[in-house]
């Protein structure tokens, strides 16, 4: 009982600081992003979207699943940390040299000559990020989300100010590059400061081999997932104009922020906790099911509300030039309902050390994603995004297969756990749609729609006796008590 209470206390403390990190940081980034979007043009975001593809590929080779391997390993040592640190650094330098030399080919592929200099400067983030991986992992293992929250907050504020200043001064796409690099550099500096850890002058091949046994499967899955996640950006950047990729990038951004924030708050804390329970099947399953219910409780209504309010949101905050993203954004919201649920299913597989299954599931999903992109391409940008939604829906059933085999908690049981939340969301949808359809201005629609949506959903959830209402109350009470005690 004492152990269970201690675990709950760690989860609540971690969730508190992880919430501050994600909500505050994403909130500030959200505001800065809106101001930048009003100043800059869609083509600027399209250019950054082209470069983001190659940064993502480089990052997956640098990380190589070692972060998860360190978290999953119970008897980790300073030798393990140091080995991973040097591996990350060496691979990052090699990746940077490769993409630096390949910048002209990247520019030629996208038919955008300005990408040569943009790429060579932007890709410095590959080396900068490599320095932060082990430091970030150490804080996560120690459940030190307070330090992570403070680091993220400082980096997003300072880099945001620099990006806004440069945008107002007419630097265009370079303001986005400066914002990205500044945030990464500040993050590395503060991670070293808070960790008080430096790598030993040692690289252990024995340690590397043991960690790589787990991480190699995560690396394989990461490569497949990164190709899948960036496949559409690559196609849009090549086939359509920079402006179209800018629309796609921005349409993804806001659903990703909302879905990702909720997921990160719950999952960021729980992977190390799930890992600590890998030898206790019953407790692991209990935590897993509760997490699933909690994610569904927040994600489904949040994404639905964003769909309902997407048009007034875009027109009012981003201006008319961004209106083409509305249907793309709505389909992406539907797609992102499945993302955190599928992510939790993969998380629990990794937590019990089955990275081989993690790799297998991603390998199964990739041909489906590729086929949808090929079929949808002739029909335009919206068809490509609808294809992403369909793939995410299919991916949910695929990702839920092994949790069903291992724990008896497969797709249909998971859907059964969601039905009350779906009913409450449908009630919220009807209330919000009827209430805002006749309102004369976008500002009124947002001011009325957001609180009305939240209030009607919580009321419906209470009437339908959704258990997470009590759980949210309990967690909120614990957080308030901790904050009161801290003050």
Image (cartoon, rainbow, N blue to C red):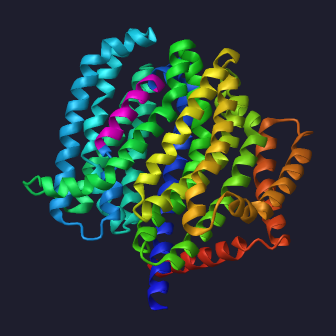
Q: Is residue 186 left or right of residue 50?
A: left
Return the x and y of residue 227 as percentages of the image width and height: 46, 32
Considering the whole magenta stretch, tell me its main secondary structure. Answer: helix
* Residue 168 shows in the view: no
Q: Quadrant of residue 278?
A: bottom left
Q: 478 or 318: nearer the eye?
A: 478
Q: Is residue 112 magenta?
A: no
Asked if residue 274 is positioned above or below residue 262 in the image, the reply reads below
| Left or right: 274, with 124 as reference point | right
The number of numbered badges drawn on the structure is 0
Looking at the image, which is closer to me, 272 or 146? 272
Residue 61 within the segment the image draws in magenta: yes
Report the side of 218 relative to 11 (left or right).
left
- Residue 350 % position (x, y): 43, 59
Q: Residue at x 52, y 48 (%)?
A: 26
The quadrant in which residue 94 appears is top left
Q: Is residue 401 visible?
A: yes
Residue 362, compared with residue 68, is above or below; it is above
The residue closer to the viewer here, 178 or 357, is 357
Q: Specify the quadrant of the image occupied by residue 240.
A: top right
Query: Is 362 situated above or below 119?
Result: below
**Which residue is drawn at the image coordinates 51% and 47% (left, top)?**
361
Identify the residue shown where x is 70% and y is 77%. 470
- Residue range of the region highlighted in magenta in the rendering: 49-62
Image coordinates of residue 414 in percent, x first then y, are 68, 62
Q: Position of residue 191 (x, y in %)?
A: 28, 55
Q: Residue furthest left?
A: 201
């Amino acid at each position: 009982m004492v152990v269970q209470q201690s675990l709950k206390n760690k989860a609540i403390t971690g969730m508190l600081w992880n919430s501050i990190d994600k909500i505050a940081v994403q909130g500030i980034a959200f505001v800065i992003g809106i101001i930048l979007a009003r100043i800059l043009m869609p083509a600027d975001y399209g250019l950054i979207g082209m470069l983001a593809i190659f940064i993502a590929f480089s990052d997956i080779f640098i990380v190589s699943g070692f972060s998860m391997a360190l978290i999953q390993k119970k008897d980790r040592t300073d030798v393990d940390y140091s080995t991973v640190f040097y591996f990350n650094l060496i691979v990052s330098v090699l990746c940077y040299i490769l993409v630096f030399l390949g910048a002209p080919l990247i520019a030629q592929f996208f038919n955008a000559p300005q990408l040569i200099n943009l790429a060579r400067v932007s890709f410095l983030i590959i080396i900068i990020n490599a320095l932060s991986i082990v430091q970030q992992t150490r804080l996560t293992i120690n459940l030190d989300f307070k330090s992570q929250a403070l680091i993220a907050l400082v980096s997003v504020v300072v880099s945001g100010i620099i990006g806004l200043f440069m945008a107002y001064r007419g630097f265009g796409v370079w303001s986005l590059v400066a914002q990205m690099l500044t945030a990464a550099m500040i993050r590395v500096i503060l991670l070293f400061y808070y960790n008080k850890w430096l790598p030993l002058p040692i690289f252990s091949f024995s340690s590397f081999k043991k960690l790589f046994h787990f991480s190699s499967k995560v690396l394989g899955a990461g490569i497949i997932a990164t190709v899948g996640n960036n496949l559409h950006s690559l196609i849009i950047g090549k086939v359509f104009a920079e402006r179209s990729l800018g629309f796609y990038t921005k349409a993804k951004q806001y659903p990703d922020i909302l879905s990702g924030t909720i997921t990160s708050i719950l999952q960021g804390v729980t992977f190390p906790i799930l890992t600590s329970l890998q030898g206790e099947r019953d407790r692991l399953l209990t935590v897993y099911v509760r997490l699933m219910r909690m994610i569904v409780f927040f994600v489904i209504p949040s994404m639905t509300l964003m769909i309902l309010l997407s048009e007034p949101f875009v027109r009012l905050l981003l201006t008319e030039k961004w209106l083409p993203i509305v249907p793309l954004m709505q389909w992406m919201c539907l797609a992102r309902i499945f993302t955190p649920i599928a992510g939790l299913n993969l998380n629990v597989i990794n937590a019990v050390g089955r990275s081989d299954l993690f790799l297998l599931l991603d390998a199964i999903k990739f041909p489906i994603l590729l086929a949808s992109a090929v079929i949808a391409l002739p029909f335009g940008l919206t068809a490509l995004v609808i294809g992403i939604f369909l793939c995410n829906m299919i991916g949910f059933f695929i990702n839920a297969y092994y949790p069903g085999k291992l724990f008896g908690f497969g797709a249909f049981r998971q859907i059964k756990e969601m039905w009350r939340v779906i009913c409450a969301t449908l009630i919220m949808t009807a209330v919000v749609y009827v209430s805002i359809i006749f309102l004369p201005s976008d500002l009124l629609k947002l001011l009325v729609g957001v609180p009305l949506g939240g209030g009607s959903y919580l009321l419906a959830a209470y009437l339908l006796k959704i258990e997470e209402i009590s759980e949210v109350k309990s967690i909120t009470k614990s957080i308030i008590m901790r904050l009161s005690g801290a003050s």
